[in-house]
Image (cartoon, rainbow, N blue to C red):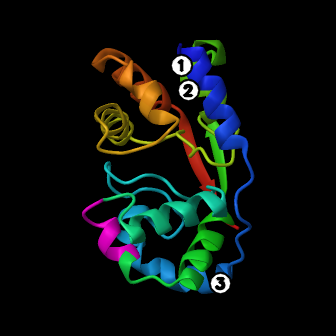
Amino acid sequence: MRLGVLALGGVLLAGPLAAQSGDAEAGRALAGQCRTCHGLDGRAQIPVAPNIGGEPASYLAAQLRAFRSGERVNEMMSVVAASLTDAQIDDLAAWYAAHRPVATLAADPGAAPELCAACHGADGLSVVEDAPHLAGESNIYIETQLKAFRSGRRESAVMGPIAQDLSDAEIRAVADWYAAIGFEIAPP
């Protein structure tokens, strides 16, 4: 069952995303409002925020639009995104996407969580455009998101079924694996 869901997830995630056009320099100016949680370069400053530097622009724009529309809900992000125009979303996405993520995996890549590595990479750098990088994320953030997918508080046709079958111990193992990966964000 898990492999079938994983294969379906890869097909769904690999589909084309709408082309994004944004102005990275305009996004840099807007990123001041993001820096408290995500840093100006996209490196999370607090354990409950994800790293966003180096994520694909299409992924970042889709998440911001989901927060703005209420499709995805977060106490802080919903408020921030509500005031953003489409152009501002594209500009922010262009700025953070202009950075380059660098992961350093010290462990054997063969020990990576199999269900996760197919989309998020053994080293935590995603191999499909619509999956976020997990390298260097705090284990608190990863665990919280997986539990939200498992309970249905966060909806995803791909992640919901995968997380639904994970035990707390499996979730913690995934979170610990990706949190242990060395992670840097190179400037544009």
Amino acid found under the numbered disc labelled 2: Cys
Q: Which residues are magenta?
A: 74-81
Residue 78 in which image quadrant: bottom left
Q: Secondary structure at mark 3?
A: helix
Q: Position of residue 74 (x, y in %)?
A: 30, 59
Disc nearer the start of the sequence (3/2)? 3
CB-based contact (under 8 Å), mark 3 and mark 2 = no
- Which residue is disc 2 drawn over? 116
Residue at 60% across, 24% down: 6
38 left or right, relative to 134: left
Give the number of the disc on residue 113: 1
Q: Is residue 184 above or below residue 161?
A: below
Observer-nearest residue: 176 or 3? Answer: 3
Give the number of the disc on residue 151: none
Q: Position of residue 56 (x, y in %)?
A: 66, 57
Residue at 53% across, 16% down: 2
Quadrant location of the C terminus in the rendered image: bottom right
Residue at 34% across, 31% down: 150
Q: Is residue 79 above or below residue 147?
A: below
129 left or right, relative to 71: right
Q: Is residue 121 in view?
A: no
- Which residue is disc 3 drawn over? 25
Q: Secondary structure at mark 1?
A: loop
Label 3 to label 2: alpha-carbon separation: 33 Å
Residue at 49% across, 77% down: 31
Predominant SS of the magenta segment? helix
